[in-house]
Amino acid sequence: MLASHNSTIANTVPAMLAGINSGIALQPVPARGRGFIAQRDIKAGETVLIDWPIILVCNNLKQYCYNCLRDLSILGHSGVHCSECRIAVFCSDACLRAAKGNPAAHTADVCRVLSKADRSGLNEEDTLSLRLLAQAQALSAASNPHNAVNPTMQEAAQQQWTAFARMQSAAPSVTPLYDQQRSIRLHERLRSTSAAAGVKCMSLQDVEGVLSREGINGYGVMAQSGPEGERRIRGTAIYPLACYVNHECLPNVARVDDFDSSQYPHNTRMCFRALHDLPAGEEITQSYFPLPVGYQERQKRLQEDYGFTCTCPRCKEEASWLSDDEEAMEADAPQTAEGSQEMDTGAGAADEAYIGMFLLKYVCPVEECGGTMLPPPTGDLVPADGTTSFKCNMCGLLRTEEQFMAAVQEQ
Ligand SMILES: C[S@@+](CC[C@H](N)C(=O)[O-])C[C@H]1O[C@@H](n2cnc3c(N)ncnc32)[C@H](O)[C@@H]1O
């Protein structure tokens, strides 16, 4: 069973279940729960973590492969439809077979629930959450030894369900992260749909646990940007190790994925690469949103979506840039208990010049892209490939060190 609030396991460190890491270890981090700490000096460009998802939920079943989220429009055919539900579409027979054999994807139970799903009155977000719940419900059922048809599948499902249960959930006191009315509504819908499909429904407590964990730990899998450059996602993914990478606004790693440029299962893996050299003992951190996002917006999103006030060196410095007008506006705006202007400024801060140079170096220069420029790969997980350019993890733009220096000269 998934508890909706994991106070007792908040600071325990789960064993690694899947994925590969190099030079990092999961440890308790003061005031942040758990996080990855470098165990040795790490070089710029090194891959420190490769992870595969427990659950992938497709946002648009007509546009992306239900199993691996590959963009169907690049295939040159309309995809392979599930012959039972006629709803799920796959990029290949291989993906269809893989999904049918994966309890968290599209086994017979999920297929029946999907075909019986009553979407009336549900908005897009609720429809996606219902899909996530159907997949999580099947994973939970498959993890139960009493339901086991195949011991190997049961063991794998149990490991995945346990990994999910160990992820941080939103405490009931943190709103709106924990929306109990929504959980009750979606549980009710899952119950009627599951009954129509002849499938046992998970408990309300499990529904709360799944939704709360997805909210904090789920990764949006990026799609091509919209016509105005707006960011779009093709689905949501739950990764058993990547979920432990904490946030900082001047991160030292960034993620890279290959959803369209490779084939299942390789395309669903997520890699984290170091942006610069970092010493043993330093925490591995990523930014939970694009680097150019401003201070007040970052604080708002971190508080609303993740339930914490960021006190990283960039936030400490940028808090002091607020003009009198902005401060007055902030004073009028609703404040959280911590108060975004009253941050502790005790520990080290990044100065304005450092922040400016960091953003110049790591923010993709393509307008509206918002991607992060990563150094060429190196290290033992993904060895050097001979490239010398930095590459954007969103649009793929390449930039050499010389081109970067020329951009610095222009400033
Ligand atoms: C995706 S989880 C990261 C792993 C989490 N620390 C754990 O122990 O499972 C995101 C949560 O970690 C915590 N967190 C991440 N970055 C943080 C930071 N810079 N300061 C404080 N808490 C942070 C917040 O509780 C946030 O909701």
Image (cartoon, rainbow, N blue to C red):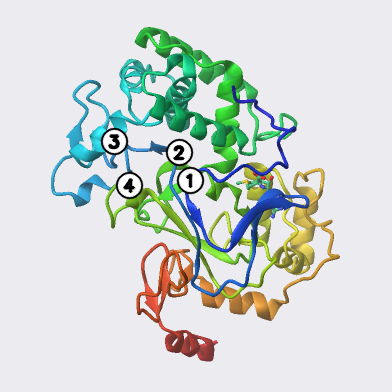
On screen, residue 173 above or below 204: below
Q: Label for residue 195?
A: none
Provide the residue designation for mark 2: 54
Foreground residue among 341 and 361 = 361
Label 1 close to label 2 by CB (< 8 Å): yes
Please name the residue shown 60% across and 53% down the image. 245
Indicate left or right for 173 with 150 as reference. right
- Residue annotated with mark 3: 98
Q: What is the x, y in percent for residue 67?
A: 32, 38
Disc number for residue 18: 1
Examine the image and state in which quarter residue 113 appears: top left
Q: Which residue is mark 4?
A: 265
Q: Earlier in the sequence, mark 1 or mark 4?
A: 1
Q: What is the distance, in whole Å, between disc 4 and disc 3 at their CAs?
A: 9 Å
Closer mark to the observer between disc 1 and disc 2: 1
**Residue at far left of view:** 77
- First along the sequence among labels 2 and 4: 2
| Residue type marked 2 | Ile
User: Mark 4 and 3 residues: CB-CB less than 8 Å, in contact?
Assistant: yes
Disc 3 under 8 Å from ligand 1? The reply is no
**CA–CA distance in space, label 1 to label 2:** 9 Å
